Amino acid sequence: MLTYLLLALLAVTIAAYFAGFTKARSFATAPGCSPQHSLSGYHGAFVAAWAGIPSFLLVLLWLLFQGPVIDSLLVSSLPPDRVEGLDIGQLNLLVSEIKSVAKGNVFSEPDAVVLAGAERYNSWSTIAIWAMVASVLSLSVAALFIARSKLAPRFRARNQVEWITSVLMIVCSLIAILTTIGIVASLLYETLRFFSMVSPFQFFFGLNWEPQIAMREDQVTSGGAFGAIPVYVGTMLIAFIAMLVATPIGLFSAVYLTEYASSGMRAVVKPLLEILAGIPTVVYGFFAVLTVAPAMREFGEFLGFAIAPNSALAAGAVMGIMLIPFISSLSDDALAAVPQSLRDGSYGLGATKGETISKVLLPAALPGIMGGILLAVSRAIGETMIVVMAAGIIAALTLNPFEPVTTVTVQIVTLLIGDTEFDNPKTLAAFALGLVLFLVTLCLNVIALSIVRKYREQYD
Amino acid sequence: MVKGSLTMDQQVVSPETTTIRSVVENPKITSKDVCVFYGDKQALFDVNIDIPRFAVTSLIGPSGCGKSTYLRCINRMNDTIPIARVTGEIKIDNQDIHDPDLDVVELRARVGMVFQKPNPFPKSIFENVAYGPRIHGLVKGKTDLEELVATSLERAGLWGEVKDRIHEPGTGLSGGQQQRLCIARAIATKPDIILMDEPCSALDPIATAKVEELMMELCENYTIVIVTHSMAQAQRVSQTTAFFHIGYMVEYGDTKQIFEDPQDKRTQDYIFGRFG
């Protein structure tokens, strides 16, 4: 029904366009008329916008309020002796039973009150839908005629359409912004709930992370410990290893591509490097678990010391490989943006290629390179799939790269997997971890972007 | 050393490529049949010039005539362009610059270059000037370096204007100051030749006058070759002038004679403003 309504609305809108267009045409061809302010197409678009947009908004509002209104009608129509003494939960249960009966899902023999309620619910639903169709279509048609009657040769349809377009664009950007604010607000709300159960002091400074919740009173780990330090140290360790791999490789490959490679070589190598950025992280995860980690363990055995199968080194190294294209492509842009005149100036003074790169080009491109590195760091901290597959789950407080460590993202995933209830600190801890993670990456991104922006102004 | 004196002789290569050139005694730079190719395209045809020492030589001609290309042959800057190929012979003080025993890095330390657009490095004024001496190991110790930087800036006529802010960025100077900083930077590597590729084209008249004055002072100690679009500038600063046209060196001689009594029809047309 809704689909047909929207199609009908679309048809009215298209009809409105032609109605406006033909009326505007008649001004243009009428003899002795003053010249038209706007092209006929703008008149058509003006009428179409008025016929289409308000009615569409009405559909959205109607759908938003139809459910609650019918529900409250239903509750108030139930016999008082049946509703008396029920709390909110039981009342909701009754309403959803009536609704499922109304849809025809009858499991056991429903009582008379429920049957009568289901009947009323169905009839109200039908009335609501037809009322919506009638009111939306009549609004649309009425708007069409009102807007069309406004058209005149000197009517500024062009400016009006411009205004409507700008409002639409503002709405679109608001949706993105409001979604972000909503996500942050919900994170913040759940985090505050978490901190009402676990003290922030324990979370930020505790050295023990064991987020289990007792099923029975006498269980061994009945308390659950929420000291997040080991988790953050693990995250930093893996990110550090990743950057240790990615920074030199990415930077040097960028230097090679901008300064040494022939154009043919560049045309081949650059896209190949960018393919790395297109590999799904879950594939990197396989690679870490099935190839890198066993190879490292065997190598460690060969040298005579133990490397854990899910060591920080394996996860970090593979994550570093994932980050190479990030750093190389941003460094490449930064180096390419250094004006040729600086290279000429350095060569003209008798500098070799290496001296020119290390003493002139890299310092000049440093802000851009730093921006790239910081963006990569925030990627490394927030990266989930590789560490879920390749890093450990136990939060050990260690800086040894051969030991397993866990990360914030891994902990969030494990805390929220399976059946979860959002009333205990175990699940709410995920939100606190997430909020801190968000704040850290936000800061890194802001710093990185401001550095990149500053550097852009330098040569303009 | 004695300044080279000029005598005229005429050498006919073909009717199209008549070259009128001067014989310079004891030249600093000699070029024999220098050709430059960019890929398949030949940009410079058999250029023969002897450039006198301790003088300013200007290269003039319409855009795309090959004068900058020739200038860039003298310190082998064309090596940095992958598709460029240079043939012929260029000698500085009778030493072939394409000799495999000669390192291009040493050559460029002896032949300084100043570019069309001022191109100071994004470093401090001090670091800009100290760059060349540092990479060539010209000085030992901090005080020697500071002295060399100061004398280089002094010679470039910039010391008085920047001595109080020597550690501020070189890119913060005005255009004319930046260009003189680039000259100081070139001087600091103790070259005997300074090449200037349209050094004043990005400067206003007052800054131009200062740089020109500087060139006239510097030619007492350096051999200067300058590419310029301004015929007035060539007349003001140079003792000898070469006129280039579509890849050929058409006429070369005493500046006064080139501007007052050009021998070749093409030179006449260009100098008297009939094209270009």
Image: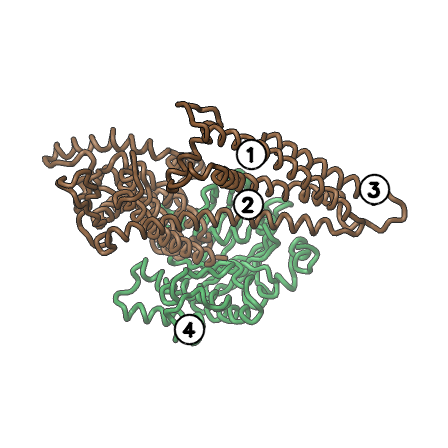
Q: Nearer the viewer, mark 2 or mark 1?
A: 1
Q: Colour of chain A?
A: brown
- In the rendered image, residues at marks 3 and 2 fall on the same chain: no
Labels 2 & 1 near each other (Cβ < 8 A): no
Labels 2 & 4 near each other (Cβ < 8 A): no
Q: Amino acid at mark 1?
A: Trp
Q: Which residue is label 1 attached to?
A: A124
| Secondary structure category for the residue under label 4 | helix
Residue A317 in view: no
> In which chain is the residue bearing label 4?
B
Q: CA distance from mark 4 to mark 3?
A: 74 Å
- Residue closer to the observer: A285 or A354: A285
Disc 3 crowd rating (10 Å Cα; few below 14, some 14-19, many 20+) is: few
Q: Is residue B263 left or right of residue B172?
A: right
| Secondary structure category for the residue under label 2 | strand
Disc 4 crowd rating (10 Å Cα; few below 14, some 14-19, many 20+) is: some
Q: Amino acid at mark 4?
A: Val
Q: Is residue A156 left or right of residue A293?
A: right
Disc 2 crowd rating (10 Å Cα; few below 14, some 14-19, many 20+) is: many
Q: CA distance from mark 2 to mark 1?
A: 88 Å
Q: Amino acid at mark 3?
A: Ser
Q: Which residue is label 3 attached to?
A: A26
Question: In the figure, A220 relative to A200: above or below?
Answer: above
Q: Which residue is label 4 attached to?
A: B162
- In the rendered image, residues at marks 2 and 1 fall on the same chain: no
Q: Colour of chain B?
A: green
| Secondary structure category for the residue under label 1 | helix
Q: Which residue is label 2 attached to?
A: B43
Q: Nearer the viewer, mark 4 or mark 3?
A: 3
Residue B217 in view: yes
